[in-house]
Image: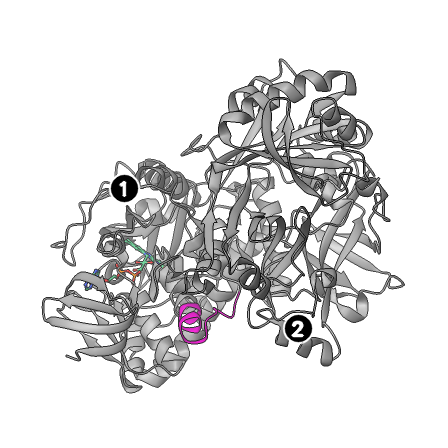
Amino acid sequence: MKTSTQVVVIGGGVVGASVLYHLTKAGWTDVVLVERKELTAGSTWHAAGGMHTLNGDPNVSKLQQYTIELYKEIEAASGQDCSIHLPGGLMLADTVERLDWLKMAVARGRYLGMDLQLISVAEAKAVFPLLEEQYFLGALYDPVEGHVDPSGVTHAYAICARQAGAEVYRNTWVSALSQRADGTWDVVTDQGEIHAEHIVNAGGLWAREVGRMIGLELPVLAMEHMYLVTEDMPEVAAHNASTGHEMPMALDFSGEIYIRQEQGGMLLGTYEQACVPWSPKQTPWDFGARLLEPDLDRIAPSLEVAFAHYPAMATAGIKRVINGPFTFSPDGNPLVGPIRGIRNCWVACAVMAGLSQGGGVGLALANWMTQGEPGLDVFGMDVARYGDYATLAYTNAKVRENYSRRFRITFPNEELPAGRPLRTTPIYGRLTEANAVWGASFGLEQPLWFQAAGEPAVENVTFHRSNAFSRVADECHAVRERVGITETSNFAKYEVSGPGAETWLSSMLTNRLPAVGRIALSAMLNPAGRIEGEFSVARTATDHFFLFGSLPAEVYHSRWFMAHLPVDGSVTFRVIGLGLVGLSLAGPRSRDLLQSVTDTDLSTPSFKFMDFKRIDVGMIPAWVGRMTYSGDLGYELWVTPEHQLALYDLLKLVGQPYGLADFGLRALLSLRLEKSFGTWFREYRNIYSPLEAGIDRYLKFDHDFIGRAAVEAEQAAGGPKRRLVTFVVQPGEGAEAADVIGDEPVWHDGQVVGWITSGGYAHYVQRSVAMGYVPTELAAPSVTGFEVEIIGVRRPAQLQPEPLFDPAGRRMRQ
Ligand SMILES: Cc1cc2nc3c(=O)[nH]c(=O)nc-3n(C[C@H](O)[C@H](O)[C@H](O)COP(=O)(O)OP(=O)(O)OC[C@H]3O[C@@H](n4cnc5c(N)ncnc54)[C@H](O)[C@@H]3O)c2cc1C
């Protein structure tokens, strides 16, 4: 065994083996994999081997596609049989909503390069004769679905990696990890110690325990999962004989069932409602490659549906029942990437669909480790999407919710209830009294909209317009015509200070830093010149700054900042979290209202647009910035938590004569659309350059910043190849009306030319608006003939070259 190496990958399941393989492929060959028992001895050996390309996140879909395409390559290179079967797969819709969902999946597939087809029930029956037509409305057919042998795949990865120089140590248990001052690791095993530059936790069922070796509580939980395999079935033999093909795979949403051919019979697995976590607190180290006791009663409701939907299954004998544990994160997607604040520590765990996702996970992580970036948009599986709030109990609640909803639709306006409320601000009770409908982001409750008094504060979930529509319209009008107040604590807040603060921040951000007492908007780029972050930067002293950014990206952004901090201690970087909470006043009467409770002169000459000052509001000390995301006259007020309730009560009291109204996130997002303001995670992500996103105004080439050279190269090469644009869309009539959600394809001249990043109804200007990326040559105002495909219908869309509301920006500055 080596005593020193560049990387130790901990865990020899399909994921660890894929990471090892991809590291060698990326050129790092002094790498080892350490496995407690035999390869596949965790959850991999008893997996059903099924794989498919569809995922709610299009970026994860791409990685699933990559994974499936990789198998032929590793099979050929290793000589190891992976038993690749690609009979295609059906997703069977039993409700109108599910059919709509499938239409959207087909549409997304268009720009992802997937060949997905919507077919009738009769067509589905023709390829999958076991189904009973009366239960279904239609189906999606995906030719790139199938199954592999999980053990074969794992060994194929390992063989290829070994061929390139990697080493694999079986029967070697990592019992402790400790980090040296230089950031390298001592990996203690029962076969001796290995000194490594990097460690990768691919511990699967034990990823949580491996994390705990260094004080990390990763949000991972194992669930029991059952599938059964039938005896040979004559119906299957008849189909194979008449078509010469294997049965396709099928997903049956109402029964929470997946089903596929296994030799001469069928394999049927369930995501049952009565789901059960396995070893919820601690995975025993002595758990070997064994199965759990099957519990057919637990999956009986799903079996009942299966026997009705596929009658031949009811009479088939059951050959074996498998019950095994495998791991999930709270949202069901993997946890991949570097851990914030711990050098050279990487994870690749909670991969619940290792055969669909393992290749993509390995590719992304290997890119990240060898090149500093994943090279792909992997936020959907970045470990940084969870913060410290994701405790063991939170994870348990969310994973059970996710497991039992695995085949349920989550509507774009749906907020899932498990693990809530967990984080609240001091005005939570007041806003609840005001009939707020709540959502949660990064564990924090945020008001979405306000229901009329006496009506239940509940939103109908739908792909169309919900009961929130008219209420949100009223909130938008209140802001544009009078003044509104909303909670803004759902921003991430950071404090940067110290003698080196100015120089360091300047090197991190694209814009010139603001003068003391001012705010500047700025982007943060990676070396490839792609947008890593977008912030409001407020300067309160020569060496003191506040940064405001996206809350769900708090760990993501702070990880980036912390990794780039100077080592000389000249800069202090602090995540403020809920140490500062906020309220925003927006609308033409906001100044008059605020002036009535402060002695500070708020007239424009003394308190200009983008000024940032410490003022007293009533008795309450507050940092106040003159800006709002609504694009109107407005203020953001930041206070310590003990003051927020008094501030809210004061503003509500004095606000009455000004017509002050509560408004929520839905209204704010609607108002920003009519200003064509982009938002983090949608318009701004690390796959877009600032030139593509049209935030050139944030770029100042009077200072050096990360990514500058790449932007200059992009400019020198003729500018961006695609551009962010705004469309006004015809959304359909009456109950059929639907606004974009995001991820819809943009058509032009009969071709898919781009995709939508976000949109919705802009209530004040009364237009359905969509923002998205199209090729630069099509981004000219004169170009017509666009369509956006919304729930299976191509809707005419018109480019909107300037903001629909106040294009000159006078309202903000008045
Ligand atoms: C019944 C069932 C059916 C499934 N069906 C499918 C399916 O059809 N399709 C699909 O894609 N997925 C399926 N899965 C899920 C799939 O099994 C997992 O996604 C996959 O196995 C995850 O692989 P992994 O490498 O992350 O974890 P694991 O397979 O658990 O591997 C982790 C490895 O790390 C080793 N290890 C842990 N800690 C240490 C340590 N300290 N020192 C040394 N070694 C260590 C373990 O021994 C283990 O071998 C199924 C799972 C089950 C239970």
Q: Residue at x 40, y 47 (%)?
A: 257
Q: Residue at x 84, y 65 (%)?
A: 780
- What is the crowding at mark 1: few (fewer than 14 residues within 10 Å), some, or many (at least 20)? some
Instruction: Indicate which quadrant contains ligand 1.
Output: bottom left
Place of residue 60 in the rendered image (x, y in percent of width and height, measured from the top left)? 49, 60
Mark 1, secondary structure of its residue: strand
Mark 2, secondary structure of its residue: helix
For the C terminus, the quadrant is top right
What residue range appears in magenta? Answer: 363-376
The residue that label 1 is drawn on is 277
Place of residue 350 in the rendered image (x, y in percent of width and height, measured from the top left)? 34, 55
Type of amino acid under label 1: Pro
- Magenta-drawn stretch, dominant element (helix, strand or loop): helix
Q: Which mark is residue 711?
A: 2
Who is closer to the viewer here, 743 or 376?
376
In the rendered image, residue 549 lying in the magenta stretch gets the answer: no
Residue 540 vertical placement versus 591 (above, below): below
Residue 237 in view: no
